[in-house]
Amino acid sequence: MLTYEQIIKKTITLEEARTLFNPHFRKENTMVFTNGCFDLLHRGHIYYLSRARELGTLLVVGLNSDASVTKLKGTDRPVNNQEARADMLGALGFVDYIIIFEEETPLELITLLQPDLLVKGGEYKTEEIVGHREVVSWGGRVETIPMLKGYSSTSIINRKRL
């Protein structure tokens, strides 16, 4: 079982990522990267993230900051702040690291990390995935994972409003 200290240590800064993901570390690991808001952690997220981790030896999650979520989803979001969302992701044993990013897209983070695999949900076409060109340019792969039907933070929030 993870302690709270172990959970919060999974959230790292860009500077920490630059140091941690050095060439030696990268040689020994296959980095899978995904990103999202993960506003209300639900069964669909668990399925998706666990499947993403199966594709490599290391799963790094880019987490939209509170300001980024608000820009993407509207003024009533996020429901949970970025620290709470990062802690929930960190409690999952198959999530290795979380990096909070401020931008609307994770392109800058993807370019910095240069993951071996970029993964998104099956609702996206490969060409629509931010960073797909860049990942392919350095020899990486882009994959989609089918989503569990009926599970999304937005649909859960909308059901609760009715």
Image (cartoon, rainbow, N blue to C red):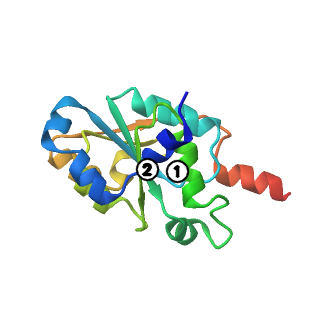
Instruction: Work out whether residue 157 or residue 123 is closer to the camera in this orientation and state it.
Output: 157
Q: Residue at x 41, y 31 (%)?
A: 53
Task: Tell me if residue 70 comes above or below residue 6 in the rendering.
Answer: below
Instruction: Work out whether residue 75 or residue 60 is closer to the camera in this orientation and state it.
Output: 60
Q: Residue at x 49, y 63 (%)?
A: 65
Where is the C terminus found, in terms of image quarters? Answer: bottom right
Q: Residues within 10 Å of mark 1 (few under 14, many from 20)?
A: many
Task: Tell me if residue 48 comes above or below residue 11 in the rendering.
Answer: above
Tell me the element at label 2: loop
Amino acid at circle 1: Ala
Q: Which residue is mark 1?
A: 86
Tell me the element at label 1: helix
Amino acid at circle 2: Thr
The mark nearer the N terminus, 2 or 1, is 2
Marker disc for residue 129: none
Spatial separation of the CA atoms under disc 2 and disc 1: 7 Å
Residue 157 visible within the image: yes
Q: Residue at x 47, y 39 (%)?
A: 6
Determine whether, in the image, residue 31 is placed left or right of residue 91: left
- On the image, the x and y values in percent for residue 55 come to 35, 28
Instruction: Work out whether residue 69 or residue 26 is closer to the camera in this orientation and state it.
Output: 26
Where is the N terminus found, in terms of image quarters? Answer: top right
Q: What is the count of numbered marks?
A: 2
Q: Residues within 10 Å of mark 2 (few under 14, many from 20)?
A: many
Instruction: Work out whether residue 146 or residue 45 is closer to the camera in this orientation and state it.
Output: 45
* Pointers 2 and 1 in contact (C-beta within 8 Å): yes
- On the image, the x and y values in percent for residue 119 come to 38, 41
Task: Tell me if residue 134 comes above or below residue 146 in the rendering.
Answer: below
Q: Which residue is mark 2?
A: 11
- On the image, the x and y values in percent for residue 56 come to 32, 29
